[in-house]
Image: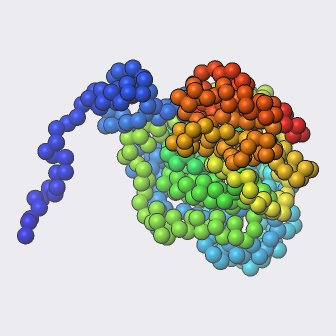
Amino acid sequence: MTVLPDDGLELAGEFPDVPHEQWQRLVAGVLRKSGKDVEGAEAEEALSTALEDGLRTRPLYTARDASPEPGLPGFAPFVRGGRAEGNTVGGWDVRQRHTTADHDAVLADLENGVTSLWLTVGEGGIPVAGLGPVLDGVYLDLAPVVLDAGADAGPAARELLKLYEERGVAREAARGNLGVDPLGYEARTGQRDEAAPTAELARLCAEEYPGLRALTVDALPYHEAGGSAAQELGASLATAVAYLRELTGAGLSVEQAGGQLEFRYAATADQFLTIAKLRAARRLWARVAEVCGAPRAGAQRQHVVTSPVMMTRRDPWVNMLRTTIATLAAGAGGADAVTVLPFDHALGLPDGFARRIARNTSTILIEESHLARVIDPAGGSWYVERLTDELAHAGWEFFQRVERLGGMAAALRSGDVERDLAETWRARSAKLAKRREPVTGVSEFPFLAEKPVVRESAPEQPSGGLPRVRRDEAFEALRARSDAHLAATGSRPRIYLAALGPAAAHTARLTFASNLFQAGGIEPVTGGTFADSGASEAVLCSSDALYEEQAAARAAELKEAGASHVFLAGRPGEYPGVDAYVFAGCDAVAVLSATLDRMGVAR
């Protein structure tokens, strides 16, 4: 029997240390083969990926990328979590959203894994007077209730507090959040809520309802308007500071005021960015509390919602994968409560199946994947720690910009915040249009023959303030044009894909062109002749070598057969008879829109 030494295995003990420069030389050698002649740090930079907020993800992180000490869970700066035990006891709070007075759906959620309710009340949601019937049969001392009532925050809060009294719920047993968020309401609607009972309800909760919080700091309006992760962080921080000023001005201590806030953030399918954002958010809030002289108030409570911006209307089943990754990231990032939006969220009211999948997403990650058993599982990763630090600095910079503008209210009313968010979204929209940021099922691998998923219309959401954007919106507009054409004529607009040479020569570009045009609702035809295809335009697909030999002649043949416009997939050079080129990185939205115009497809 072999006995291991006391210090265990030294798996790398017999290998020499590898200098960073040696790795860079190897990278440079590989890049040189692809035509990039770079050396040293430039070689490493060539493999880096640009993120929003001026950040970059490098291909390699080492111990030299050390970041500030994140501390321990439950201790400042709370990067690793606001509670010493994290979510290890029972997992995160599985919080599901309801916008209609569907009592059966509420009970089904609570009976099948949901641990708290997020209710939209008032305009675009459940009537204030309907709270009682919706919560009939709900054990209010066991299931926390979180309100989202906009301008009706006062009446909704009083109605919920009345239900606690009528049903004999002890004040110390009440849990949840009354959802007062006048700045969030103004961001959504452009209307000021000067009568919001912010201080009144905060004092009541602080003094009589220890398990209730009065205020929500909702960053979703900024995320849904196209804001970056740093802008979302900075806006939430500026909002929270504004509430701190109001509450302490009304006589509450900093500790009491901080204890009345719950922060709401978005989780996207960008797993590491989401993890870093939640960790950075806690660090930033801890810094605010420290500056205010109340470090104990720096343990931020986070409610995380899977991003509405990433949800697509086409091929909505893929949304299940997006929300699963986002939920994993939220859990790994230390979220206290997580709301998984149903996969059909963008289409209207979810059905029972969609709600079941949404709540089971958290259940599987908690119960089967055991994700909550480890506190801050990404902590210690050089990449995650560095990204957390960089994102915290970028978020603090945006927060300072808002403060220089006079605070969150002034920045909203001046339009500066909206302009900043719009600029970020313009840059991102350009990447989406060029498919540099792919949207699976929409701009990549679309399925034109899919049967539409139809849902009952959801209540209209308050509007008038910051816009709501979606990643799929430009391609959705193109697909809608194609759908209308199909309904009017019985067929979709078509394009003929002319493959040159053997499959080995044309398959890659044929697949590229097929995906590209389907993303705009244009049906590709690959078999038979152009004359039989029912198309008015064509695309040549092959290798550069065969283009050199055959492109001009084949383009002439297609024009002779009636093609009004001939594309070439790729851009190896100019050829007679070829009118335009489609290639990786081209503005797909512009190309597809112009093609539909030429085909007579109405806007």
Q: Quadrant of the N terminus?
A: bottom left
Residue 117: x and y in percent read 69, 65
Q: Is residue 432 left or right of residue 120?
A: left
Residue 191: x and y in percent read 85, 40
Q: How is the image coloured?
A: rainbow
Tell me: residue 232, above or below residue 548: below
Q: Quadrant of residue 579?
A: top right
Task: Look at 22% across and 34% down and name the residue there.
Answer: 18
Task: Look at 64% across and 67% down and name the residue there.
Answer: 357
Q: Residue furthest right?
A: 488
Q: Is residue 79 left or right of residue 164?
A: left
Residue 82: x and y in percent read 49, 53
Tell me: residue 76, above or below residue 536: below
- Residue 498 seen in the figure: yes
In depth, the one of 147 and 558 nearer the eye is 558
Task: Look at 13% across and 45% down and name the residue there.
Answer: 14
Task: Look at 12% across and 59% down and name the residue there.
Answer: 6
In depth, the one of 262 and 11 nearer the eye is 11
In depth, the one of 70 and 297 nearer the eye is 70
Q: Quadrant of the C terminus?
A: top right
- Residue 411 seen in the figure: no
Q: Is residue 360 left or right of residue 538?
A: left
